[in-house]
Amino acid sequence: MEEMEGSGRPSALQAALLAAGTGLTALLYSVYRQQTRLSRGLQGARRLRLDGELRAVLLEAPGRCVPYAVIEGVVRSVRDTLSSQFVDNCKGVVQRLTLQEHKMVWNRTTHLWNDYEKIIHQRTNTTAFDLAPLEDSTGVAVRVMKPLEAAELSLETVHEKFHPSVQSFPDVIGHYISGERPKGIQETEQMLKVGAALTGVGELVLDNNTIKLQPPKQGLRYYLTSSDFDALLRKQESNAKLWKILTILFGFATCAVLFFLLRKQYRYHRERQHLKQMQQEFRQAQERLMREVSTEGGETLKNACVICLSNAKSCVFLECGHVCSCTECYRALPEPKRCPICRQAISRVVPLYNS
């Protein structure tokens, strides 16, 4: 029989593992459900073309609105464009300038230098723009609203330069003492260029004479991506599948821990029941023996052999003088024979005769 703890309760570590596994599985399942809902939302999105029929479709739609629509076109500025600060003749409608600090930080736990990056400045400039037909024809244009709220805003990096830090010898000594070694500043410019192909997924509304693409309601996600819609859908389905696999793996691990704890609890209670049954059987056997050894004259266990509790005492041990055993049990004592009461060696035995 395996050893068990004094109680059938799980240890603190086992309880912590079960709680952590359950919480993590619930979190993964929540993310999986969200990703699945986004994937189904994309599958149910209505694909529309930038042509003359788009305005008629919106006029017939309830509230002149398509709650979740897909539009593919090219970027066209409405008024002024944004010019790149570093590249000539580079025009766009969204410009993001970023300064990122790179340095080495001493880890006091691992005693290693680790890379550390921190954005010290970032500015994003936007101007109004439309999505126009891929082929410049008589199609209509769609005004893109709140582009910075899009989940995937595809910006192209047009400039990137790293400025290494210049350090003197005292600076190097000071950096080693402080535990921080600056490497330099990385300068990056990203832009959404005029003429770039863009896929927009969101709410499409007809506001007066302007068709607008804006962030959708009902918890759906707003997309402005350079990928086509099919690639975007495949990516979202892959994300949902990945979270599903992670949820299943952690769910199985949590179930395995729970099964182990339940099995341990079951075996503990089964062994307790077995022990109680053995104790009950022992008490019943004692009671039965006490009834069997009682004599016809009303004498009880005080005249019974202390070894078998069945026969009457029939011999005297010398030199201790104890009267405690029957002849059969005396003969069964191992060599060298000793008195079962005082453990003194038995030199000889005298038969006891009851008149």
Image: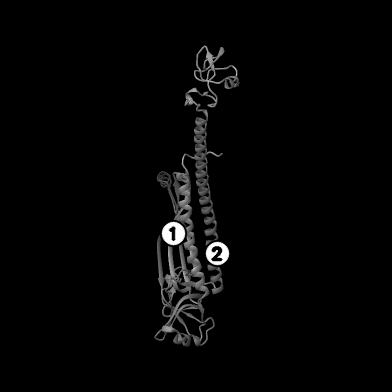
Q: Nearer the viewer, residue 114 or 153?
A: 153
Determine whether label 1 and label 2 are within 8 Å by CB: no
Q: Position of residue 201 (x, y in %)?
A: 48, 75
Q: Position of residue 340 (x, y in %)?
A: 52, 20
Q: Nearer the viewer, residue 298 or 218?
A: 298
Q: Which residue lies under the disc numbered 2?
A: 241
Sequence-wise, which precedes: disc 1 or disc 2? Answer: 1
Q: Position of residue 160 (x, y in %)?
A: 49, 63
Say which amino acid is labelled 1.
Answer: Gln
- Is residue 189 visible to the viewer in this orientation of the structure? yes
Say which amino acid is labelled 2.
Answer: Lys
- Is residue 4 visible to the viewer in this orientation of the structure? no
Q: Position of residue 105 (x, y in %)?
A: 44, 49
- The residue depicted at 50 percent of the width and 30 percent of the height is 290
Eyeballing the image, is 330 above or below 46?
above
Eyeballing the image, is 217 above or below 7?
below
Secondary element under disc 1, as helix, strand or loop, is strand
Q: Which residue lies under the disc numbered 1?
A: 100
Crowd tier of the residue under label 1, counting other residues whose Cα lies within 10 Å: few below 14, some 14–19, many 20 or above: some
Q: CA distance from mark 1 to mark 2?
A: 34 Å
Secondary element under disc 2, as helix, strand or loop, is helix
Crowd tier of the residue under label 2, counting other residues whose Cα lies within 10 Å: few below 14, some 14–19, many 20 or above: some
